[in-house]
Amino acid sequence: MSRNDDAAFWQSANNHLIRYGSPFDPAIIERAKGSYVYDADGRAILDFTSGQMSAVLGHGHPRIVETVQRQVETVAHLFSSMLTRPVVELAERLAALAPGLEKVLFLSTGAESNEAAIRMAKLVTGKHEIVAFSKSWHGMTGVAASATYSAGRKGYGPAAVGSFAIPAPNAFRPRFKHPDGSLDWQTELDDAFELLDAQSTGNLAAFVAEPILSSGGILELPKGYLAALKKKCEERGMLLILDEAQTGIGRTGDMFAFQRDGVTPDILTLSKTIGAGLPLSAVMTTPEIEQAAYEKGFLFYTTHVSDPLPAAVGLTVLDVVRDEKLVARASQMGAQLFEGLCAIKDQYPCVGDVRGRGLLLGMEIIKESGNREPDHDMGAAIMAEAFKRGLSMNIVKMPGMGGVFRIAPPLTISSEELDQGISIIGDAVKACVAR
């Protein structure tokens, strides 16, 4: 009998845990190391989501372990107005990596950083309308949830006043097309802002966007889109907030995804990857915006603002990314992963598309009807089959979308481990197609 079938464990879980999203995986995870998590039977499960898209250095990286042990013994938490060297040093390091965004605020979660960024934008502009993409995910709290359109909008009462959405560009399912059938994103963007202007009361404060919409199905903003979006914002006196919770700290092959396009946002939020699995997030902005916010009395006083323990971890994350050359490695390993997934796509018509950048890729599952109709059942079956074979990967299942696997292994993953994961995906698809 499998130790994962511990009846007392699952009974206790059912009795006492609040269910907060998708069903729990059918395994009891006892430990994690490197690119694997290990269940109660000691079975190694290859982690193709880096935990919750966060563990960019894999699990239990020795330098992270050493930092946590050292910092806990030194100082982990203080009164919120007290400063420590790790906090100031991490702010300095991040500022050097993102020229123009020299002012930094450290918090705990992605939702919290987006709350702070939107709050700052509203205060500085004196406006209140916030725009996001129709398939966005910016968090489950307050205005972050109001700017989240991929899920979770029904049943919770009114969203924040002044919440607007525009369509996310989708090259696989283009709404506006060039004569050759490719996505005409400029016309789509122009149309979206024309409709937005018609609805706005003249109080557009900010646009918050992910460079690659992850929960929305790994939808990458096309080259040129970010510059055009920033121009739209500047024309209306809006600030551009980029949420790089999943794309920051090297995952896409650049330190920050926006750097590919040469477009610096007014405010940048980081989370997930900067803490490598521990709760750390950051808000970065220009000295001018920070000064204006300060003069207007910006308030974001939280229990864990500027905590030294996560800041020390963030410093170690940056050290490891630099020392192990993980930004370049994300490009190299990403190319290997992309090629392997495309080979599966070429073999099985149910794999409709492979897309993304670096080590943040999506594989979309569709019905074999020829019209790109989503196949949620097949996607769920492939995910379950892969898990049985020793691979954990996450599938997005949203209304109006296909089942899109979000594939984001640790940046430290080996070439052999990547090949293992690709092989398991191929075998899982083959098994499900054969049923």
Image: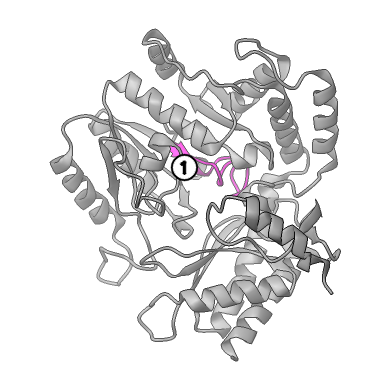
Give the quadrant of the C terminus: bottom right
Q: Is residue 161 magenta?
A: no
Count of numbered marks: 1
Give coordinates of residue 162: x percent, y percent. Answer: 25, 36
- Decide: is 381 above or below 404: below
What residue is disc 1 on? Answer: 140
Name the side, left or right, on which 143 lies relative to 376: left
**Toward which corner of the image does residue 60 lie, by quadrant?**
top right
Amino acid at circle 1:
Met
The residue range painted magenta reads 241-258
Furthest residue to the left?
198
Q: Is residue 242 above or below residue 336?
A: above
**Between residues 435 and 24, which one lies in front from this camera angle?**
24
Residue at the (72%, 40%) spot, across then down: 321
Front-most of 315 and 328?
A: 315
Kindly tell me whether residue 243 is visible in this rendering: yes
- Residue located at (60% from left, 78% from top): 344
Residue 256 lies within the magenta run: yes
Q: Image height check: is 345 above or below 395?
A: below
Residue under the point 49% across and 58% down: 218
Dot 1 falls on a residue whose secondary structure is loop
Main SS of residues in magenta? loop
Q: Is residue 183 above or below residue 263?
A: below
Q: Is residue 422 visible?
A: no
At x 38% / y 13%, what residue is drawn? 292
Within-10-Å neighbours for mark 1: few <14, some 14–19, many 20+ = some
- On the rendered image, what quadrant is the N terminus found in? bottom right
